[in-house]
Image (cartoon, rainbow, N blue to C red):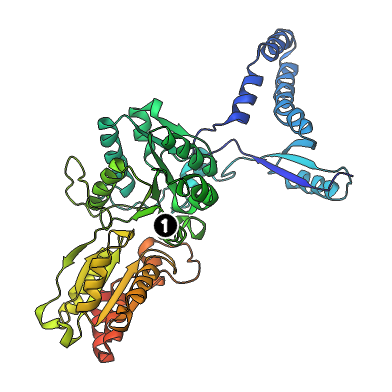
Amino acid sequence: GAERLIVILNDNEMSIAPPVGSMSNYLSRLMSSRQFMGLRDLAGKFVRKLPDRLERTAKKAEEYARGMITGGTLFEELGFYYVGPVDGHDISQLVPILRNLRDTDNGPILLHVITEKGRGYKPAEAAGDKYHAVAKFNIVTGEQSKAPPGPPSWTNVFARELVRSAEQDDRIVAITAAMPSGTGLDKFASKFPDRFFDVGIAEQHAVTFAAGMATEGLRPFCAIYSTFLQRAYDQLVHDVVLQNLPVRFAIDRAGLVGADGATHAGSFDLAYLGCLPNMTIMAPSDELELLHMTATAAAFDEGAIALRYPRGNGLGLELPAAGSIIEIGKGRIVREMGAQSGREKGGVAILNLGPRMVEVLKAADQLAAHGLAPTVADARFAKPLDTALIEQLARNHAVLITIEEGSECGFGALVAHHLSKTGLLDNVRLRTMTLPDRFIDHDNQFDQYNTAELNAPHIVKTALNALGVNSNITQSVAQKTVSGAN
């Protein structure tokens, strides 16, 4: 016998981007077919001869019939017993129906529920997409609190450089999974409509589609949020990495994302990509680095390359007209350790990956005020590691701290693994600073990183503890850093 299964279709006619895909197209074709339109015209002529009240009733009946065509006929063809459409806001109607369905033995049932996104709250009803992820807002007006206009977002810097690279190289194509504006690819699409592909909410297909394009000599950029790329991991491994294909993954929303909460945090990509052969992983520490890394990814011809960057705005750095190519697998020294903090004094090196660099430099200033100026390095690459840089830091310092906007088992683990293989782990006190091994709740990004203990005071504390410095200094430095943190 048929299994007892109840599927509730919540139909609010809302999506972040316009619906795409075969089912949507099929239904649109059906609704606009000559037979269906002919039937409507005939019904329309008949209805116009009816009195007003009956005409209104007939129009409602026609809307209901359309619901049955797009709902009932379709789902019954798929083997469901179709019930609906039902008003999802009328609880007195909905609850008895749900009770009846629970107690029936009719096999698979589909309940078609019509709802309105934001129902009962006028500002949300008027702008469903604006209330998809909500910051603090004025309940009376619905106005959401906005940060003052600031520097361009990381997403826009990526999009700008991708468009520029695509102007130079017509092999560059861009793919998104229902997030054209969220990934900045709407700008690419308006410039190159024939080279832009939105595959809908189908990240697995996006990745395999990109792999297919790469086999034919195109240079696909697959722009997907870090948390959503998790859905396509099998395709990433088998269709891209195993085949060693040059697909470029633009991984937006890497790290903690603030108002979208734990489901959207890009916490795991360094860990789930770092274990894969043939994978290059870049993480810019500021938007100028993002410009260079986007240009590098565009010029890259061997194997998969991932470029991870956060949600939010950059630092407001002056950007050149074009990014420059950087050497794969090479980091850079940002600040040399003060002479008085040499190894004999117990020097500290901080090896940063990604946008924590702002907090690292704040921490470095505080440590310098106590005669403990650290060496600050920007890894740029989680893979391949700049092993020469890592070994140099490990040899010349008493303490080496790695810091990243990702979970355990990521960049710090790769550094630790390399140092253990070379025997240098015996020479240096290594401390890896990562996101904690738990999900972090909804908050603004700065406060989320406070919770994660990845801001300047936490870096200072980690350095002083590793050095075994007097705890009074730890407290004094930490207090100063906290007061200057915002």
The spot of residue 161 in percent (x, y) is: 27, 40
SS assignment at label 1: loop
- Image quadrant where one finds the C terminus: bottom left
Give the percent coordinates (x, y) of residue 436.
45, 72
The kind of residue on which mark 1 rests is Val
The residue that label 1 is drawn on is 257
Q: Please identify the quarter of the rendering in which residue 49 is found.
A: top right
Please tell me which residue lies in front, 377 or 474: 377
Vertical side of 14 occupied by 449: above or below: below
- The residue lying at 28 percent from left, 57 percent from top is 329
Relative placement, left or right, of 86 versus 196 is right
Query: On the rendered structure, is 68 left or right of 234?
Result: right
Q: Nearest the camera: 341 or 139?
A: 341
| Image quarter of residue 465 | bottom left
- Residue lying at 48% horizontally and 49% vertically, measured from the top left: 242
Vertical comparison of 199 with 252: above or below: above
Q: How many marks?
A: 1
Q: Nearer the viewer, residue 217 or 105?
A: 217
* Residue 142 seen by the camera: no
Camera-nearest residue between 171 and 162: 171
- Residue 186 percent across, percent down from the top left: 38, 35
Return the residue found at the far left.
Answer: 339
Q: Is residue 404 left or right of residue 202?
A: left
Classify the position of the N terminus by image quarter: top right
Q: Residues within 10 Å of mark 1 (few under 14, many from 20)?
A: many
